[in-house]
Image (cartoon, rainbow, N blue to C red):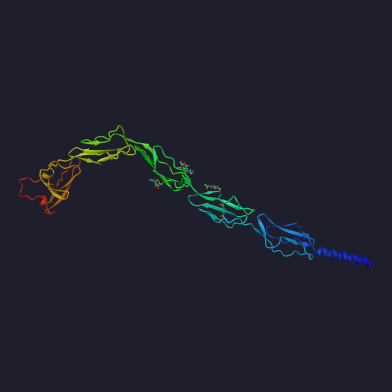
Amino acid sequence: MISSVLVLLVSFLCHYVNAGLTCPRPQEIPFSTVVPLKLNYEPGEKILYVCKPGYVSQWGTRRYTCSLNGMWPTSSMKCLPRVCPFAGILENGAVSYTSFQYPNSVNFTCNKGFYLNGTASAKCMEDGKWNPPLPMCSPITCPPPSIPNFATLKLYKPSVENSSHVQDTAVFDCLPHYAMFGNDTVSCTEHGNWTELPECREVKCPFPTRPDNGFVNYPASPVIYYKDKATYGCHETYVLDGPKEVECGKFGTWSASPTCKASCKIPVKKATVLYKGEKVNIQDKFKNGILHGEIISFFCKNKERKCSYTVDAQCLNGNIEIPTCFKEHSSWAFWKTDAADKEPC
Ligand SMILES: *[C@@H]1O[C@H](CO)[C@@H](O)[C@H](O)[C@H]1NC(C)=O
Ligand SMILES: *[C@@H]1O[C@H](CO)[C@@H](O)[C@H](O)[C@H]1NC(C)=O
Ligand SMILES: *[C@@H]1O[C@H](CO)[C@@H](O)[C@H](O)[C@H]1NC(C)=O
Ligand SMILES: *[C@@H]1O[C@H](CO)[C@@H](O)[C@H](O)[C@H]1NC(C)=O
Ligand SMILES: *[C@@H]1O[C@H](CO)[C@@H](O)[C@H](O)[C@H]1NC(C)=O
């Protein structure tokens, strides 16, 4: 009887002690898993903390054993994210990032004149490597420019082997007789091509027409081309109105069409006038008239104030208007004072 009670008590105690001394579910450590994972463990049972992909263990052991008193040893272990190689500097470009740890991404941009050889973004992967691999900023270059028809390269110097950098320029010339339409200068763009090429077109001008009372000289060739020149002149007493030399322009027209303008006979026999700031006698100075465009000033009287003033008259292609206030002296009215001799008003 006693023995049976004892057996019962001992077995109860044993059960109690055994039940009380199992270890609970182990402490959670961020970014790790426990193998094996159970609700409780017998003393002596072992577990292993395994860091999740992309994380590595640091500080302390990963293996723990359930102790006889039913407790896990305290753990200082941590699972820290992997760190990818430094990627904070991109030559000729810029990097934006928060960190180089798994699972972060960094972004890349290139400076002006460079293009991204690679992708604009890379991610730090579980294995601690960048994916895709880090890019480079390579200089943008243009191949040699193509040469428009009827043009020549006047200025071109490749800055790298047979190619040009962004903003490098090339300058074209047209062959003789050809005129340029568009910009003679092209530059290497950010797209790796050149700005729009100019065009060279053959340009002819009509023969210049001879002006009345004058002449024109031009090349003795069957065709007059762009930039050819013609020179004009007038017969005696006629004055050229326009430039002496004209040029065949890019639109097939002459830069000007000069004409010859007639000189003027002055319908006054005798008078003192002002010519280029000097007093001269018409009868001496302008016997043969006055050339087109020239100006003389006649003297008029102000009777009340007994003084004189001047009024201009210009010869315009054979016509000159004598101011109405001007009074020509009869040659015998010697007692009258000429207006030119009076005090200016
Ligand atoms: C990278 O670019 C993406 C898309 O533009 C953006 O959402 C992200 O915030 C950028 N990351 C950084 C670190 O700048
Ligand atoms: C672009 O990058 C690849 C790989 O990094 C490299 O082999 C190639 O030479 C680069 N291209 C230029 C034009 O720099
Ligand atoms: C540059 O151009 C010349 C002539 O076209 C050619 O012979 C040479 O191989 C080119 N060099 C390179 C690096 O492309
Ligand atoms: C011609 O092109 C050059 C460079 O491409 C530019 O600097 C210049 O202003 C242009 N000239 C004209 C008249 O458009
Ligand atoms: C240069 O390339 C860009 C982009 O492909 C295009 O938009 C542009 O029209 C090109 N320029 C010329 C002059 O062809």
Figure quadrant of the N terminus:
bottom right
Residue 157, compared with residue 36, is above or below; it is above
Residue 44 position within the rendered picture, expressed as x and y whole percent measured from the top left: 79, 62
For the point 90% across and 65% down, the residue is 7
Residue 264 sits in quarter: top left
Q: Is residue 80 left or right of residue 213?
A: right
Q: Nearer the viewer, residue 261 or 245?
A: 245
Q: Residue furthest top?
A: 222
Q: Is residue 302 left or right of residue 203?
A: left
Residue 270, compared with residue 77, is above or below; it is above
Residue 283 position within the rendered picture, expressed as x and y whole percent measured from the top left: 10, 44
Residue 217 position within the rendered picture, expressed as x and y whole percent measured from the top left: 25, 36
Q: Is residue 341 left or right of residue 172?
A: left
Q: Nearer the viewer, residue 81 or 335?
A: 81
Figure quadrant of the C terminus:
bottom left
Q: Residue furthest right?
A: 1
Q: Nearer the viewer, residue 97 or 139?
A: 139
For the point 91% across and 66% down, the residue is 5
Residue 12 sits in quarter: bottom right
Residue 74 position within the rendered picture, expressed as x and y whole percent measured from the top left: 72, 65
Q: How many marks?
A: 0
Residue 120, compared with residue 69, is above or below; it is above
Q: Is residue 315 left or right of residue 120?
A: left
Residue 208, compared with residue 77, is above or below; it is above
